[in-house]
Amino acid sequence: MAVKFSTQSKVRKAFSRIQMIINEFFEKGHHYSWKLAVYNTAWWIGNYCHPLVCLQFWGKKKITEWMDSYIFNKQLLSFPDSYRNVNKSIVEEYRIWVFWWQGKDHMPKLVKGCYTQLCAHNSNVVLITRDNIMQYCQIPQYIYEKVENGSISFTHFSDIVRVTLLADHGGIWLDSTCWITGEIPADVKRLPLTSPKTLNAPEFPWWSNSRWCGWCMGTAFVRNPLFVFVRDFFFSFYSTNSNIPFYLFIDYLYDYAWRKIPEVRQMLDAVPENNVKRGQLHFMLNKPWNQQEYKQLVKNNWVFKLSYKTKWKTTCNGQPTFYAKLVCQHTSPTI
């Protein structure tokens, strides 16, 4: 009997994940230590196998301890001390930063829909591409070289780009798959630090733990100490390294800054709860369009995280889907 396509897809995905975990084990063991390799493997197993989530919590705890020790042993412990009194200033021109290396013409359909929607309702949107990045980002040449030869992935290069832009210019960073319902609220643009946040959320084995979302972070300051610290850390780290210790490295660094720099802790803790349903639209895109349901969803949420890697449908049971009505039309409907 032939295996159903969905089952085949799940099997392929499972094998792909197993291969990735094995590759990461030897990669981290070779570049850093076999202890880190074990901790990282435990984290990934717990991430993909929910009954073993205790492994993910244990892995996160041990990775944090290992990284703290690594920073100390590399004599980077003084790093946070120099960021306790950063000379920051208010942003004069609040820009909205989006990054797509190949440019707008090469965006996947969902990314282009999100970008067009953003531009339709907001001014000062800057799309960072390979053609204009040096106009806005002062990134060391050795990092560009490592991106070109593939030793730094575009995913982790985007982490460097976002903190550099926010440190040097302020404004707000949006991942290219963020759906914005309209104009970004004016009060958001006045905050020292902003990011989607959920208060009193259940504990998760991630460094952000609902305190921030790296795909949407902003500041009304030029030289905000959080982004200056992480930017400078990246520049120092990548001067002698290419391989990151673990996937959520940037979230660990945000958490490290929160633990070590009082002003960063104060700013992150002061971010009000917002966009609590930020992940819900993703799970609605293949459902039949319902204007009232959308209107209710966006009532207290202005940003949602989507994905261009999911297979989206334009119809469901003969009716247009949320994806068709929102993304494919490139503009938000009148609500």
Image (cartoon, helix red, strand yellow):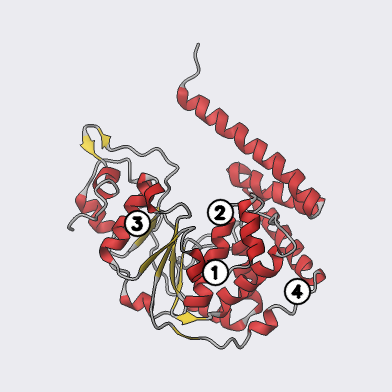
Q: Is residue 45 above or below residue 96?
A: above
Q: Do callouts 1 and 3 mark residues in contact (Cβ within 8 Å)?
A: no
Quadrant location of the C terminus in the rendered image: bottom left
Residue found at x 45% / y 68%: 195
The residue drawn where x is 64% and y is 57% is 145
- Across and down, in percent, residue 5 comes to 46, 23
Mark 4 residue crowding within 10 angstroms, few (<14) / some (14–19) / many (20+): some
Upstream in the sequence, badge 1 or badge 3? 3
Q: Which residue is mark 1?
A: 163
Q: Is label 1 in contact with label 4 (beta carbons under 8 Å)?
A: no
Answer yes or no: is residue 208 visible: no
How far separated are the C-alphas under marks 2 and 1? 13 Å
- Looking at the image, which is closer to me, 139 or 286? 139
Image marks 2 and 1: residues in contact by CB distance under 8 Å: no
Asked if disc 2 and disc 3 are in contact, CB closer than 8 Å, the reply is: no
Could you give the CA–CA distance between mark 1 and mark 3, rounded to whole angstroms?
A: 20 Å
**Displayed quadrant of residue 188:** bottom left
Q: Which residue is mark 2?
A: 155
Eye-nearest disc, 4 or 2: 2
Give percent across and percent down for residue 69.
78, 67
Q: Is residue 288 left or right of residue 93?
A: left
Question: What residue sits right under mark 3 in the picture?
Answer: 115
- C-alpha span from label 1 to label 4: 19 Å
Residue 90 visible in image: yes
- Mark 3 vs mark 4, CA separation in Å: 39 Å
Of all residues, the one furthest to the left in this rendering is 334
